[in-house]
Structure formats: structure tokens, C-alpha cells
Image (cartoon, helix red, strand yellow):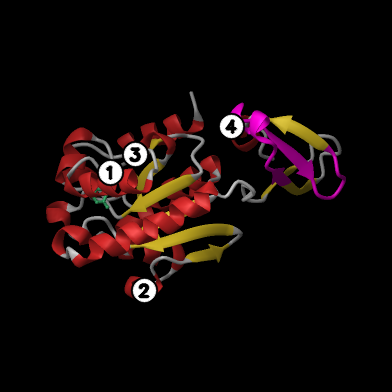
Amino acid sequence: MHKLESIAENVRECQKCELCETRIKAVPGKGNFDADVIFVGEAPGRNEDIHGEPFVGAAGKRLDMILEDTGIDRKDVYITNIVKCRPPKNRVPSKKEEESCNDFIKQEIEIINPKIICVMGNTAYGTLLDGKEITKNHGKIVEKDGRKFFVTFHPAATIYNQKLVEELKEDFRKLAKFLETKDEPKQYEERRCDYCMAKTKHEVVVMPKVVTRKRRWLFKCTECNHERWLQPYRTVAESLY
Ligand code: URA
């Protein structure tokens, strides 16, 4: 079983906070396990609670519309939420609920190791980046702990405020442009060198098209210069430490 599938199982069985008593279904993240981008929302709404999948209701339709507009295929991305169970009446999740779910989002990010994490709305912005004013900071790339984050509005905000549709589309175009940049490497990750076993940083070097189409990357130990071709999953999920 893929590590992300076992996280999804843990989400479905989770009873760490009171939301497990009111949920119909817990909602694990869903999408491409090898995505270059993870989209992070707040928490499931009514439809997500019924179906057990993220962004399948009104906010999901907005997200789909904007993804389509920017040429990003939903099949290529991974979509998740800060909190995995629906808060009653769609209220904003409490700090305790966010903390109960914290390990899940951390693990999803670590395993997928995306090029960028798209933070949608105030809850995700606050939890992942300690951010507050999304209106001032949307459309920007922010770096934290060696990872890149793209800050934007929550798609649901465009349902109540039509003026935001264009701004959100504009942000997504910037994100799409970033994703198209071929020489943007995946991020550094701490691993053991396959040869000398030293705990070190390996650089993921983006290779010519022929090779990247096969989804294989060249890992290079930045300390001993050993090189090795590996599949993305294996490198991240199985050979960590
Ligand atoms: N809003 C969210 O933040 N997440 C969903 O999955 C649906 C609506």
C-alpha cells in the first residue's frame, strides 16, 4: 500500500478530535501522489462530508473552473485540507481541530515533496505560514523551511465576492507559469547518501525531457557527488533515512 493510502486510512479512522462525532465521512487528500503542486483548503463542507472527497461541492466547482481556465489538469495535482472532517455548519475549524490534523498535512507534504504548495484561504495561510492578511499577500511565492508556498484566496470566497474571480484566475495563471518552468528543481530533502550513507542533502536535478517523461530524476549527493537515478516515489517514501 502506498504511504499516502495508509495516511488516508488513518484519516478515515481518526478520532483525535470531536469532529469525528459529527462527520459523515472523513475526507483525506486526493490526487496525484507525484504531483508538482498540492492545493490546500480549509476543511470539508457538506458535499465533501457526504462523499468523503475534497472539493466536490460548490467550492470544488469553482476550483475546477479556475484550474481549467489556467490549463492545470486536476488529475495532475493533489488536493487536501488543513482539517479533514467537516466542522458543524461549516464553521471555521478551531485551533484544537487544526492541531489534531497537523500530522496529516505534514506527512502529505513530506511524501509528495511537491515543487510548490498552493495555500488557499485564511485557514491554510494561518496554519502553514502563520499568515494573516491574504488580501495583501495573495499571488506571492513565500519560502518557509526550505519549501515554496503560493498564497491565494479560497475558491469559495469567489462565490460571495464575484470581483475575486478575476484575481483568483490571475493568481492561478502565475502559479501555472511557475509550474511550467522546466528548470525549477524539486526541493532539497535530507536523506542518506546511497553510497556513503552519510546523512546529507541530495539535490534533485531536472533532466532532459526524454528522461523526465519517464518520471525519473537524477539525485546527486551534494557532499560526496555520487549520482543515482531513482523513481520519485521510491526516493521519497522508501529511502528516506
Ligand atoms: N472548502 C474547503 O476548504 N475544502 C473542501 O474540501 C471544500 C470546501
Mark 1: amino acid = Asp
Question: Is label 3 or label 4 in front?
Answer: 4
Disc on the earlier residue, 4 or 2: 2
Residue placed under numbered mark 3 in the picture: 28
The CA span between labels 3 and 2 is: 25 Å
The CA span between labels 4 and 2 is: 34 Å
**Regarding mark 4 in the picture, which secondary structure is present there?**
helix
At a point 74% along the width and 46% down the height, the residue shown is 202
Question: For this rendering, which residue is in front, 111 or 162?
Answer: 162
Q: Residues within 10 Å of mark 2 (few under 14, many from 20)?
A: some
223 inside magenta stretch: yes
Mark 2: amino acid = Lys
Mark 4: amino acid = Tyr
Q: Is mark 4 within 8 Å of ligand 1?
A: no
Is residue 86 left or right of 237 when viewed as pictured?
A: left
Residue 64 visible in the picture: yes
* Residue with the most extreme left position: 89
Question: For this rendering, which residue is in front, 77 or 211?
Answer: 211
The CA span between labels 3 and 4 is: 19 Å
Q: Residues within 10 Å of mark 4 (few under 14, many from 20)?
A: some
Residue placed under numbered mark 2 in the picture: 132
Disc on the earlier residue, 2 or 1: 1
Residue placed under numbered mark 4 in the picture: 233
Disc on the earlier residue, 3 or 1: 3
Question: For this rendering, which residue is in front, 136 or 176?
Answer: 176
At a point 41% along the width and 41% down the height, the residue shown is 78
Question: Is label 1 or label 4 in front?
Answer: 1
Disc on the earlier residue, 1 or 4: 1
Is residue 143 left or right of 240 when viewed as pictured?
A: left
